[in-house]
Amino acid sequence: MPRQNRIQDEIESEQENIALNRNDSIQDINENETSTGRAAGKSKTKVKSKKHNTASRKNIEDPVNNSDVENDAIIPFNREEFLATARPIKRVDNIDGVMFDLQHLIKQVEHIGFELVTDTAMAIEEVSGCTKDGQEVGGQLDSLMRSLIDAQEELKAHEKSLYDLKQRILRKDIIEKSELVKQEDLETSYIAKVDELKEDYSKKTLRQKYARHEKYFNFKERVWEVTHEDAMPPLKDLIPAEVNDSEDDSDIEVGGKTQNYKCPLTLRPMENPVTSVLCGHSFSFEGIKECLQNGSNRCPATGCQQRVTLKDFRPDEELAHRVALHLRRVRRKEEDNVDDDAEIID
């Protein structure tokens, strides 16, 4: 399917970005070393020239009369001088930039990858979830969701390794600048930490990887709701146990919950639902607007004492999607009942 291929392409793209970001982080650090050492060498050359003659000093110090290309050509990189003058905080700035890019990729996996797989799985479940082909495609989409989670965890491993590298550089700068770790040590440390975190993750069971993952739980629950009125069972019942799984899995015993899609204010299915950023309660926009305009300053949900204003509510697109799905399910059930009654009469 085209959408499924698109999802797979995004997963492969994220994995390629992992390798690219590893190389970029090391290259950024190395480039900073080279530029810092070059600047130190230029300063040294100027001092020597001053001892020989004034004209030579003028040519070196005057950027108009002196070629940058010539300066670059005659100034070698001096590691000892770099170790004595380098400021590792600039390296940290480079690492922060790479970490920012990684965090952006992680968010893209969440906001694009997870949502795309979930929406596709829900559509397949609604159209052909009860057929053999529908179940097969649903299983493939479940595997894609797990692959996205794996890719996200690998990105987080790189982020964690970069953070540890940053702290190591800062500690070295504080303790003794002359003992600043070499470039080779930084590269080895970074790669070793990433490999360690990836190995730890690979040793986890399926339950340990996915049963406690919020996005995977939401994925399974939303697909379940397409064809079921009752709450989804605990993920423990949907993911087989393995040898290393603990017998005490009380933290994954909780299943889905039956959602009430009626607005408690209008007593009708929610229209243009909004959700409070303060307490998380949802209402139809017109319902909560009228309630607050009538002088109330508390959330109207039963038992909630949170003070709210209309600006504390945000449009909830996911809830709107669920409401629409619920209404289609209700209509489909009513149509099936009509067909059954017609068959009985015949």
Image (cartoon, rainbow, N blue to C red):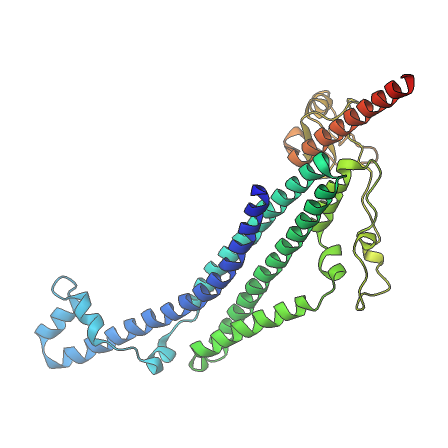
Q: Is residue 93 left or right of residue 199?
A: left
Tell me which corner region of the image, top left, top right, bottom left or bottom right, holds residue 74: bottom left
Quarter of the image for the N terminus: give it. top right
Tell me which corner region of the image, top left, top right, bottom left or bottom right, holds residue 45: bottom left
Q: Where is residue 72? Give x, y as percent.
A: 22, 71
> Is residue 263 visible from the viewing direction of this image?
no
Quarter of the image for the C terminus: give it. top right
Tell me which corner region of the image, top left, top right, bottom left or bottom right, holds residue 342: top right
- Label total for image: 0
Say above or below: 276 vs 251: above
- The residue that appears at 63% across and 59% down in the rendered structure is 150
Q: Is residue 236 left or right of residue 214?
A: right
Say above or below: 161 vs 269: below
Farthest-out residue, right? 344
- The residue that appears at 53% across and 75% down in the rendered structure is 189
Q: Where is residue 128? Give x, y as percent.
A: 72, 37
Q: Is residue 86 left or right of residue 275?
A: left
Farthest-out residue, top? 345
- The residue that appears at 68% across and 42% down in the rendered structure is 121
Q: Where is residue 233? Give x, y as percent.
A: 83, 47
> Is residue 63 visible from the viewing direction of this image?
yes
Q: Nearer the viewer, residue 337 or 166?
A: 337
- The residue that appears at 71% across and 41% down in the rendered structure is 134
Q: Where is residue 3? Give x, y as percent.
A: 58, 42
Say above or below: 345 vs 150: above
Q: Nearer the viewer, residue 128 or 329?
A: 128
Q: Is residue 263 left or right of residue 93?
A: right
